[in-house]
Image (cartoon, grey):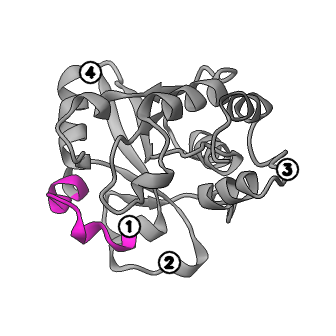
Amino acid sequence: MPIRKTKIGLYFGTFNPIHIGHLAIANAMLENTDMDQVWFVVSPQNPLKDRKTLLTDHHRLQMVKIAIDDNFNFRACDEEFHLPKPSYTTLTLAHLSEKYPNKEFCLIMGSDNLCTIDKWKNYQQILDNYKIFVYPRPEYLNSEWEKHKNVTMVEAPMMSISASYVRNAIKEGKSVKYLLTNEVIKYIDEMNFYK
């Protein structure tokens, strides 16, 4: 009987900063699927995001590490830092699958991303070769891709917290308690970020 590969859910994001919405969704994915671990893949560069508000790669990675430190089923992943820019999911998947042949990788994404997956590089190859676990975002449901054999909708808490909301709150001197872990708040304070 073949040995079952460890199933890893890849959760891509800039995590600028990582907030409780990210953590709750990752936890829901672990609880409601057959994933063994969730890897938070910190993206170095998204051509669609404003670079001005983006902290350097290592600070965002450090915040992820701090936020998930107490959960051994979560892991911070910096693989995309070492790949050609801009980073394409298809290339990251190929790289990880080659580097970790004993692991099975799948994708975690919101239904907003699923709606536009046909704009991704080699999207058909991703859809055909990788399982995609999708958390619902109410305003982005019923896309044609939801019926694809490799796409599974997963019940996860509806979180409308955004990293931009958190950054703006910090900039305006408002409390972000309960939106970030205490350790991440401490790190942001110490480093004087988002002010």
According to the picture, the residue beneath numbered tag 4 turns out to be 100
Q: Label 3, on which residue?
A: 175
- Name the amino acid, label 2: Tyr
Q: Which region of the structure is painted magenta?
A: 114-127
Earlier in the chain: of badge 4 and badge 3, it is: 4
In front of the other: 32 or 20: 20
Magenta-drawn stretch contains 136: no
Q: Earlier in the sequence, mark 1 or mark 4?
A: 4
At mark 2, the secondary structure is helix
Q: Secondary structure at mark 4?
A: loop
Disc 2 vs disc 3: which is toward the camera?
A: 3
Q: Distance between the Cα atoms at labels 1 and 2?
A: 9 Å
Q: Position of residue 153 (x, y in %)?
A: 50, 62
Three-letter code for the amino acid on which mark 1 is drawn: Leu
Callout 4, which amino acid? Answer: Tyr
Q: Is residue 127 above or below residue 193?
A: below
Q: Report the residue marked by disc 2.
A: 140
Residue 51 visible? The answer is yes
Do the CB atoms of the residues marked 1 and 2 lie less than 8 Å apart? yes
Neighbour class for label 1 at 10 Å: few (<14), some, many (≥20)? many
Judged left or right of residue 1, residue 25 is right
